[in-house]
Amino acid sequence: EQINKGNYEHYMQKEIHEQPESLRTTMRGRLIRGGSCKAKTVLLGGLKDHLKTIRRSRRIVFIGCGTSYNAALAARPILEELSGVPVTMEVASDLLDRQGPIYREDTAVFVSQSGETADTLHALQYAQENGALCVGITNTVGSAISRNTHCGVHINAGCEIGVASTKAYTSQIVVMAMLALAIGGDTISNQARREAIIDGLVDLPNKVREVLKLDEEMKDLAKLLIAEQSLLVFGRGYNYATALEGALKVKEVALMHSEGILAGEMKHGPLALVDENLSIVVIATHDTCFSKQQSVIQQLHARKGRLIVICSKGKASMVCPSGSCRAIEVPQVEDCLQPVVNIVPLQLLAYHLTVLRGYNVDQPRNLAKSVTTQ
Ligand code: G6P
C-alpha cells in the first residue's frame, strides 16, 4: 500500500502530501503529555540507556550528506539551546577528507534516510575507531547505520521512493527536536519552553496540513519562474537550513541553478548578483531574526531583486509594505519547529517547476536515492 502512488502522479508529490501522516507516525508513542500534574516529556526508547553519556559529552557532532545534513542543521539551534552541549556539523565526505578530529568524549550522530550512504557509513567507521559514542537516526530498520551504531532512533516516516527526500526531511527534524528535549534537562527554568515545544509538536501535523493548501499558489508561482536561470534562497537562524534544503530541492529535481544563502552573509558577496533579473526567495517568518530579515528584504528590494517572501500568516504587510514582493503566508509555529512548516512551500515549488519544465520528478538525471559508493 505504501509503495503505490495512490491518486498522485508522482512519488515525490505523494510524499510531500503525506507529511501530516508521516509526522504523526514519527511522533507516535514518543510524546508523553500526561495529566494536569504530570510533566510533558519525550520517550525515545532506543536512547534511554545512553542519555546520561550523551548529556556528559564534550560535544555532539552531526554527520550526514545532502538532505539529511540539512535536517541536522535545522535542529542544531534547539539542540544547543536545550542541551547546553556544543553542537558541530560535518558533511560526511568532508570529515573523511580532512580526517577531522573526533574524540572519545564526543557523541557522533549519523543522520541518513536510507542508512546506507557510503560516505556516512565510512564516517561512522571512522568515529567508532576514534571511540565516540555513535547514534544513528535513520528511516530504515536493519540498515547498515542502524546496525552499526551504539544506539539510535528510527524516524518511521514510511518508505520514501522519490529520489528527492521530502517527508524524511521533516521527520528527521522532528526526531532531532525530540532528541533535544530528551537530552535537555527538565529544569524549572526551561519547563515552559519544553512544554511549548511538545504542544507545538503535537499540533505540527495540522499545521503542515494547512500549509499544503498552498499547492495551487506554488504552482502559479512555478509558472512565473519556469524560465529562470537561477533562484536564490535567503534564510538565517532556524531557517538557514530551510534555505539550503529549498535550493537543493530546486536544483536536484527542477534542474535549475539554485543556492541557499545565509542572509547574514548577503553583504559579503551575494548582493553583487542582485538586479531586476534575479528572483530571490527570502524566508522571513516571525522569530528573533525577523527584524534582520526585514532589513535584508529592504536591501534586496533597493537593488530591484524580484522577491518572494515566505512570512508568517497575517504578516505580509510587514515584509512587503507596498506590495513590492510576492508574499507566501504560512502558519506560525514554535520557532524551532518552523523549518518543518517553511520547507513545504519550497518542496511544492520544486515539484511544480519540475513538472512544468518537463523533467523526471522521481528520478532526476545523474542522481540516485541511495549513494552506496564513495
Ligand atoms: C542522495 C539522495 C539525497 C539524500 C542523500 C543522503 O544524494 O539523492 O536525497 O539526501 O543521498 O542520503 P541518506 O539516505 O544518507 O539520507
Image (spheres, rainbow, N blue to C red):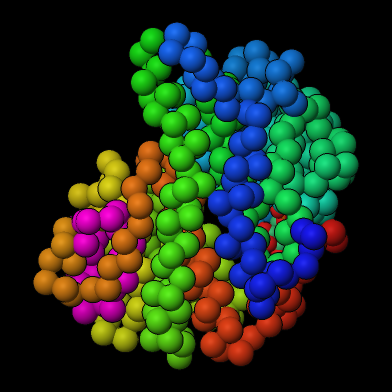
Q: Where residue 146 appears, x then y in whole percent?
A: 82, 38
Q: Is 61 above or below relative to 295?
A: above
332 to the left or right of 177: left
Residue 311 is one of the magenta-drawn residues: yes
Query: In the image, what residue occupies the spot 42% across and 24% down?
Result: 195
Q: Where residue 75 appears, x then y in whole percent?
A: 52, 40
Which quadrant does the N terminus fall into? bottom right
Query: In the image, what residue occupies the spot 16% across and 62% down?
Result: 317
Q: Is any atom of residue 95 visible in this view? A: no
Q: How many marks?
A: 0
Residue 356, by quadrant, is bottom right
Q: Where residue 333 appears, x then y in whole percent?
A: 37, 43
Q: Residue furthest left?
A: 322
Residue 189 or 280: which is nearer the viewer?
A: 189
Query: In the image, what residue occupies the spot 69% across and 48% down?
Result: 157
Residue 142 is one of the magenta-drawn residues: no
Q: Where residue 95 appears, x then y in whole percent?
A: 69, 46
Query: In the image, what residue occupies the spot 28% across and 55% down?
Result: 313
Q: Is any atom of residue 257 visible in this view? A: yes
Which quadrant does the C terminus fall into? bottom right
Q: Quadrant of ligand 1?
A: bottom right
Q: Is 99 above or below relative to 214?
A: above
201 to the left or right of 188: right
Residue 288, by quadrant, is top left
Q: Which residues are magenta?
A: 294-316
